[in-house]
Structures are given as C-alpha cells and as structure tokens.
C-alpha cells in the first residue's frame, strides 16, 4: 500500500472513530441518572449502574475474538462498518427503553455487535508500516480520546436541556455518519494471508488459533497487563457520577458536571497518546508504561480522598495522561506481537481482555459502592499499583524486537 493510501485510511478511520466515540461516550455520565428515571432508586442505583455499564463487556468478550478472526478472513473495513451501523441502531433503540431490563438486553446486544475501537485499530495496524506503529496507533487513540472528551459534555448538555433519551438518539446519528465515512472514504485493498485452515469445530479452531498466537511471543503478558490496568480503572467507573451527585447541590447541572470530568480526562489522554506512542517507537515501551501505570494508580487514589468537585477534576487530569500513555503503548505491543496476517485475531484477544475487565470492574465496583462510595476507588488504586510491578517484566528493547521475545 502506498504512503498516501495508508495515511488516507488512517485519517478517514480517525474521523469515523472520533464521531463514534463522541456518540458512545455521550451516555457515559448519564447511566446512574437514566436508570433512576426508569424507576430504580436507593442502594439499587449503584448496583444497577454497575450491571448496565458491564453488560456489553460480557457479550463483547465472547464475540471480540470471533469478529477479529473473521476480519483476518474477510477484511477489516467491513468489521468497522458492522460495529458502527450496528451501534447506531442499538443506541437509537435505547432512547425508547421503558424499564431497566430493556436497557440490559440492549446493552448485551451492543456488546455483541459493536466494538469500533478494536475493529478500527486492527484496520489501521494492518496497513501501517511497522516502524510507525506506536506513533500511528497513538494518533488513532487521539481520535478515541477526543471523541470521549467531547461526547460526555455534549451528552450532559443535551440531557440537561432536553432529556436523557435525546442523548441516545444523538449518539445513533453520530454512529450512522461514522459508518458512512468508513464506507466512502476508507479504501481497503484486502488480501487474506494464506494459512492452513484447522479442522474441527468452531471452538476447536478458535483454541488452535489462540494457541498459535501465544506461541513464542509475550502476547499473554501484554494482554494480562491490558486486563489488569483496565480493571483497576473500571472498578470505580459506576461511582463517579454518584460522587458528583453527593458533592453538588440538587439544583446544579449534575449531568454536565459529570460529563466535564470525562471530558477533562479525555483531553489529557488525547495529548498523551501520540507523544507516549512516539516515545515507545524510539526507545521502547517499558519505561513510559511503568510511569503511566503508577500515575494512574495515584490519580485513582486522589479520587478516593476527594472532598470537593475540584479535587475530582485535578485527578482526571492525571488519570487522562496515564490512560493515554498506557493505551498507546499496549496497543503497539500487541501489533508487534501479532504474526503476519493475524492482526485481527490478536486485537480480537485484546477485545476479550478489555471486555472482561469492563465486565468485572463495574460490577464489582457497583457492589462495593453500595457499601461505601470511596471503597471502589481504594481497591482500583491498589490493583493498578500492583500491575505496575508486572510491567517491569517486559524487556527493555525497542518494539521491533518484541515479536521474537521468548518468555
């Protein structure tokens, strides 16, 4: 692929991902409030918030590796479009939900049919020169973080000005436009790499393919770190809007205030991702990943101790910087560990690791939060700090040597 073509694909995918994530993240600060509108009250709000936030992750954990392997066979562009158009339909339907049970079902379907970040990452990683992988995936993460920055504050404003339901319909529109961008702007010249197709059932073929991916590489360690780092952050996710609710007076714009926290985090993640990714390309990823991990742990701990809304804002600055660094570095590791023609399968496993942490973290956090709002933040801080010591097991070499690393 020519330089002009892979760069056009990068920026076309970049624009589509920005719109998609702006849509998805618009609902992030609203779950605890929306389910109260659907009839949930009292201590059940924290528990149902955890369930609603976690629900897509369970089905995405199952479908992520399957979609990834299908992308290696049939192309990556079609998988991005599947995720965006599917998400548009499902998010639009959420705006018509009548009970919290309706939301759980739709969120489970969302996990099964979406996953735009993994699909877009696979597409970009498979068409980017390997020596530019860290920087390029950092740029793609920039789109993700900018979308996640703009989305919550716009979603909060739409909710405060119109209704919670209007935010879901706005999200559906964003995702539809993103799908059209992928359809008309991105051009994938896809030829599947010839591999011997293993015999047996689907489950047996999936197990054989996963075993081949792990053989002779450090992919298992990298995916374990992805899971642990995401888990530490996600444990506290359902409780942040409830902290805001406790800190601000009843007549305050709580949806907008909760959205602003996510916006601040996203802005600083967007700043950090390409810078840290370029650092990893030139000097190796272990040092920046170690620093980012311990900064993340500290930021989560600050939220546990916060007594004012402004302390939460400060914590989001450092959390955003850390998240941007960890995501760009870990995504580059995975791209370098993937055998030729197997990027989709590798990033599918990344989706599995991310989805499991997204499923377990908010569910556990929601139950812990029913006892104490600060407890999930303490647990997340400790879990993230422990992960930092496992980062030190990564080799010091530059990225280009990682695919041949023998653990």
Image (cartoon, rainbow, N blue to C red):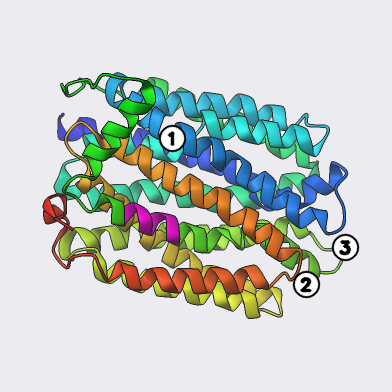
For disc 3, the neighbor class at 10 Å (few under 14, some 14 to 19, many from 20) is few
Q: Position of residue 397 (x, y in %)?
A: 13, 64
Residue indicated by mark 3: 251
Front in this rendered view, residue 51 or 21: 51
Mark sitting earlier along the chain (2/1): 1
| Residue at x 55% of width, y 25% of height | 86
| Residue at x 18% of width, y 38% of height | 339
For disc 1, the neighbor class at 10 Å (few under 14, some 14 to 19, many from 20) is many
Give the residues drawn in magenta, as a range. 222-228
Q: Position of residue 361 (x, y in %)?
A: 57, 56
Q: Is residue 88 magenta?
A: no
Q: Is residue 226 magenta?
A: yes
Mark sitting earlier along the chain (3/1): 1
Give the image quarter of residue 257: bottom right
Q: Which image quarter is the C terminus in?
A: bottom left
Would residue 263 be found to the left or right of residue 179 on screen?
Answer: right
What's the distance in space between the residues labelled 2 and 1, CA to CA? 38 Å
Q: Position of residue 217 (x, y in %)?
A: 19, 50
Residue indicated by mark 1: 64
Secondary structure of the residue carrying tag 2 is helix
| Residue at x 32% of width, y 50% of height | 331
Residue indicated by mark 2: 247
Residues marked 2 and 3 touching at CB (< 8 Å):
no
């Amino acid at each position: 692929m020519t330089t002009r073509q892979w760069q056009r694909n990068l920026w076309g995918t970049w624009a589509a991902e920005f719109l998609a994530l702006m849509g998805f993240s618009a609902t992030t600060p609203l779950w605890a409030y929306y389910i109260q509108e659907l009839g949930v009250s009292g201590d059940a709000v924290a528990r149902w918030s955890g369930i609603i936030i976690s629900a897509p992750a369970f089905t995405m954990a199952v479908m992520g590796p399957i979609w990834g392997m299908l992308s290696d066979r049939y192309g990556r562009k079609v998988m991005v479009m599947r995720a965006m158009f599917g998400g548009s339909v499902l998010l639009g339907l959420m705006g018509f939900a009548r009970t919290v049970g309706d939301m759980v079902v739709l969120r489970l379907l969302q996990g099964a049919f979406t996953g735009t970040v993994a699909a877009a990452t696979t597409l970009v990683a498979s068409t980017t020169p390997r020596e530019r992988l860290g920087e390029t995936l950092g740029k793609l993460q920039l789109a993700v973080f900018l979308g996640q920055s703009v989305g919550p504050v716009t979603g909060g404003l739409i909710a405060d000005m119109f209704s919670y339901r209007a935010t879901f319909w706005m999200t559906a529109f964003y995702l539809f436009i993103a799908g059209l961008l992928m359809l008309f702007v991105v051009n994938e010249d896809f030829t599947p790499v010839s591999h011997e197709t293993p015999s047996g059932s689907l489950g047996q073929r999936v197990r054989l393919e996963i075993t081949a991916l792990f053989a002779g590489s450090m992919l298992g360690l990298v995916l374990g770190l992805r899971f642990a780092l995401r888990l530490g952050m996600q444990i506290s996710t359902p409780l942040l809007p409830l902290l805001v609710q406790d800190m601000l007076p009843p007549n305050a714009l709580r949806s907008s205030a909760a959205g602003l926290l996510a916006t601040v985090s996203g802005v600083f993640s967007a700043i950090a991702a390409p810078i840290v990714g370029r650092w990893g390309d030139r000097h190796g990823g272990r040092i920046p990943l170690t620093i980012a991990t311990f900064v993340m742990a500290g930021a989560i701990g600050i939220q546990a101790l916060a007594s004012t809304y402004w302390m939460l804002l400060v914590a989001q600055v450092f959390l955003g910087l850390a998240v941007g660094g960890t995501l760009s570095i870990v995504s580059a590791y995975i791209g370098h560990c993937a055998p030729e023609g197997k990027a989709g399968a590798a990033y599918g496993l990344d989706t599995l690791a991310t989805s499991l942490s997204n499923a377990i973290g908010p569910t556990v956090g929601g139950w812990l939060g029913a006892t104490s709002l600060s407890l999930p933040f303490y647990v997340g801080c400790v879990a993230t700090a422990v992960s930092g010591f496992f980062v030190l097991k990564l080799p010091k070499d530059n990225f280009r040597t990682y695919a041949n690393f023998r653990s």
